[in-house]
Amino acid sequence: MNPPEYDFCLRTGKRKGEDVRRTIIALGLLDRTRKIISEGDSVYFPVTRRPEPHEIEVISKAGEIFVESRRLPDVSPSCPKSVKEFLQGLIPQNALRSLPKSYDIVGDIIVIERLLPEAEPYRKEIAEALLRVHKNAKTVLIKAGKVDGPYRIPLLDLLAGEDRRETVHSEYGVRLRVDLSKAYFSPRLGYERNRVASLVRDGETVVDMFAGVGPFSIMIAKRHRSRVFAIDINPDAVEMMQYNLSLNRLKGEVIPICGDASALSSRLRDTADRVIMNLPAQSLDFLDAARQLLKRSGGVVHIYLFSGSPPIESAVRKFAERASNVGEYELMNCRAVKPTAPKEWIVSIDAKFKPL
């Protein structure tokens, strides 16, 4: 006769609960199909099997434990609706309250901006929960530093899943190959790319001064019989842009150019009906070059810049200080695109410059 099978759990005091939990996880014993529960002054951890004597010895160094034959409640077999729901009972409440409120999904890669100190010790659990909630995701990365350097490429560390940085991202009918280790890309500007593309008209010439892998340029040319000069100083970004042209059927034409947008302004002088300036940290420094790119009869600039609080008023003031030395203009539209830090936003401004 086969011996009966039992479900085991480990009981410890609440004061040592977190240290014991980490040790159980490190030994690979935590049963994630069942819930951790708290009763009175004790915490009960489900384990996949009865621990061996040497394992009990290791765990006991973290806190006094008792092995009990008890089946703890099953984790709901249904797909969790949120990361918080999945992690309920697996990490402390203060960590649950500190979960990231937003994150980027680029293709099948999830990118977390940062974790608050309370959530930082549970980065692996949070990453695993993200993969469970987002079934199509294969990788979770976290930014290890600010976007820096001339190519605006963030340093990204792997938290869970496949160790890669390349994916194919889709938005508004456009497909883009992106390697996050080689070129900057933000899915949060998808609405802006769609908005600007909707404003372009057939026959227009557009200059995309900081084109990256081509999201603005390709979306415009996919919808309109227009010509887009797509400039970027990063050769890897331009190479990806050229590949992305083959992924999409275009009505118009995109001409990729690797180089400095300011230096190229004389080559493309008096060319554009419209100029896109998506380089928030430095875009205002290129406003003179953008006006040179516009036709002498005038044209529209779509510029993105960092702004303080209040975002609209602050951005308009910063823009006016520079634009007043460039030429006469009419402010057409201004919107806060997204927050980037406490009291800091990216703001988009559409301005129509009058004829010279």
Image (cartoon, rainbow, N blue to C red):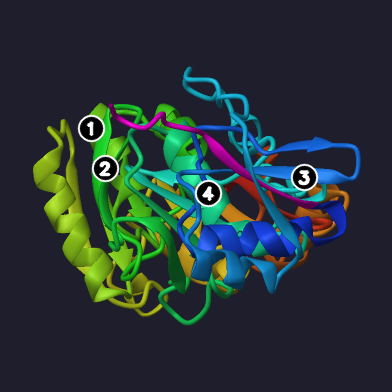
Q: Position of residue 158 (x, y in %)?
A: 41, 65
How would you rate the neighbour count of disc 2 (Cα within 10 Å): few for under 14, some for 14-19, many for 20 or more?
many
Q: Residue 222 carries which label?
A: 1
Query: In the image as oriented, which residue stretches furthest toward the left?
Result: 246
Query: In the image as oriented, which residue stretches furthest toward the top?
Result: 78
Mark toward the start of the polypeptide (4 vs 3): 4
On the question of residue 189 being in view, the answer is: no
Task: State the image quarter where residue 219 is shown.
Answer: top left
Observer-nearest of 138 and 67: 67
Specify the amino acid type for callout 4: Leu
Q: Would you say residue 85 sits in the magenta stretch?
A: no
Location of mark 4 (residue):
30
Mark 1 secondary-structure assignment? helix
Mark 2 secondary-structure assignment? helix
Specify the amino acid type for callout 1: Lys
Location of mark 3 (residue):
43
Q: Distance between the residues labelled 4 and 3?
A: 13 Å
Residue at 84% across / 52% down in the picture?
A: 14
Q: Magenta segment range?
A: 1-12
Query: In the displayed structure, would residue 336 be above or below residue 79?
Result: below
Observer-nearest of 100 and 349: 100
Marks 3 and 2 close (CB-CB < 8 Å): no
Specify the amino acid type for callout 2: Ile
Q: How far apart are marks 4 and 2 (CA)?
A: 48 Å
Mark toward the start of the polypeptide (4 vs 2): 4
